Image (cartoon, grey):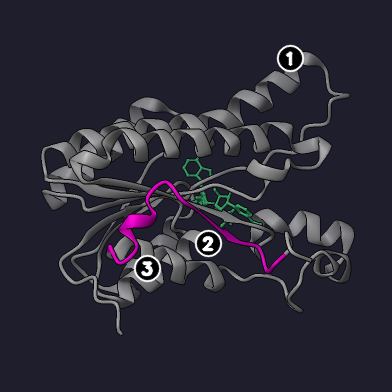
């Protein structure tokens, strides 16, 4: 069976790099029309848009700023009329040891929660209102394995922000299912992107792989197919579900 997303409008955040870029590329190949969001990497977003082709469009926004989140959603609504799927993928991971001064530590905490959790929640809220007026829709939130097993001690805020995404997504699935709104979680383990590079550089590839059941590190392209599948509607009865993509690290 070939997945065909022709006629579907999808907003994906953080599509300029890493996992988001791989998801956007595969959604585009399946025929979806994309709102490709980016923050700083305009060139790479433009390149992706060119590759996917029109009517997909690029949209810039700093998701740390709630007004800009609202503007982003409004701009996409204005441009596309309706949105079928929201994918909250943009995220940051700030290394923030507990030895830091409280002022610095809380600044890192707040920055992390703003982008990873508050922006996700706000975009979900805007999407729910939109979906209620358009007979439903789907939300796919890219959380992390860290939401479930915790992270290393320097990334407490990151793990907490991803944990928040879990209860947010499950609450949406429970509360709005009868209005035809579905919500899913993807929980990747280490994926070879800029975000994971610091860890890989520090511990080395061999140590990173030793945690896995499989024999190579997960690539962004290993995450994308599950998102395309969920976006298609073929798995709507899995709403509220979490899809672990971590090369078998839980079962290893
Ligand atoms: P990445 O390569 O670092 O890319 C991050 C993306 O988020 C970029 O497109 C970036 O936009 C965007 N972004 C960063 N700060 C932003 C801000 N303030 N406002 C708006 N957009 C912002 O990350 P990744 O590894 O692909 O991660 C994607 C998602 O997967 C994240 O939610 C991450 O937590 C999750 N995840 C990753 C891993 C992993 O090992 N890589 C594991 C588990 C979960 P610009 O480039 O345009 O600035």
- For the record, the magenta segment spans 233-248
Q: Return the residue at label 3.
A: 229
Q: Which residue is mark 1?
A: 103
Give the quadrant of residue 29: bottom left
Task: Identify the mark nearer the N-term, 2 or 1.
Answer: 2
* Mark 3 / mark 2, whichever is N-terminal: 2
Task: From the image, tell me which residue sits under label 2.
Answer: 19
Residue behind label 2 places its C-beta within 8 angstroms of ligand 1 = yes
Query: Can you see residue 74?
Result: yes
Q: Is residue 123 visible?
A: no
| Spot occupied by residue 118 in the image (x, y as percentages of width and height) | 46, 29
Tell which of 52 and 224 is nearer to you.
Answer: 224
Q: Answer above or below: position of 28 versus 143.
A: below
Q: Earlier in the sequence, mark 1 or mark 3?
A: 1
Residue 107 image offset from top left, x and y in percent: 66, 21
Q: In this rendering, would 16 be left or right of 129? A: right
């Amino acid at each position: 069976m070939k997945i065909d997303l022709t006629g579907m409008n999808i907003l994906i955040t953080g599509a300029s790099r890493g996992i988001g870029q791989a998801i956007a590329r595969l959604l585009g190949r399946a025929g979806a029309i994309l709102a490709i969001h980016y923050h700083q990497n305009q060139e790479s977003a433009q390149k992706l848009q060119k590759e996917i082709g029109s009517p997909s469009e690029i949209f810039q926004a700093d998701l740390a700023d709630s007004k800009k989140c609202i503007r982003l959603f409004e701009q996409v609504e204005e441009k596309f009329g309706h949105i079928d799927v929201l994918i909250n993928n943009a995220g940051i991971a700030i290394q923030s040891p507990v030895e830091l001064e409280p002022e610095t530590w809380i600044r890192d905490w707040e920055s992390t929660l703003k982008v990873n959790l508050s922006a996700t929640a706000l975009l979900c809220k805007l999407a729910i209102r939109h979906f209620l007026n358009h007979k439903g829709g789907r939300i796919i939130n890219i959380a992390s394995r860290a939401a479930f097993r915790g992270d290393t001690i320097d990334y407490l805020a990151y793990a907490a922000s991803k944990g928040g995404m879990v209860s947010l997504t499950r609450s949406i699935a429970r509360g709005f299912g009868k209005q035809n709104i579905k919500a899913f979680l993807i929980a990747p383990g280490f994926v070879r992107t800029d975000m994971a590079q610091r860890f890989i550089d520090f511990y080395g590839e061999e140590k990173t792989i030793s945690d896995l059941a499989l024999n190579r590190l997960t690539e962004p392209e290993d995450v994308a197919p599950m998102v395309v599948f969920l976006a298609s509607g073929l798995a709507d009865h899995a709403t509220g579900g979490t899809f672990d993509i971590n090369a078998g690290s839980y079962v290893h």
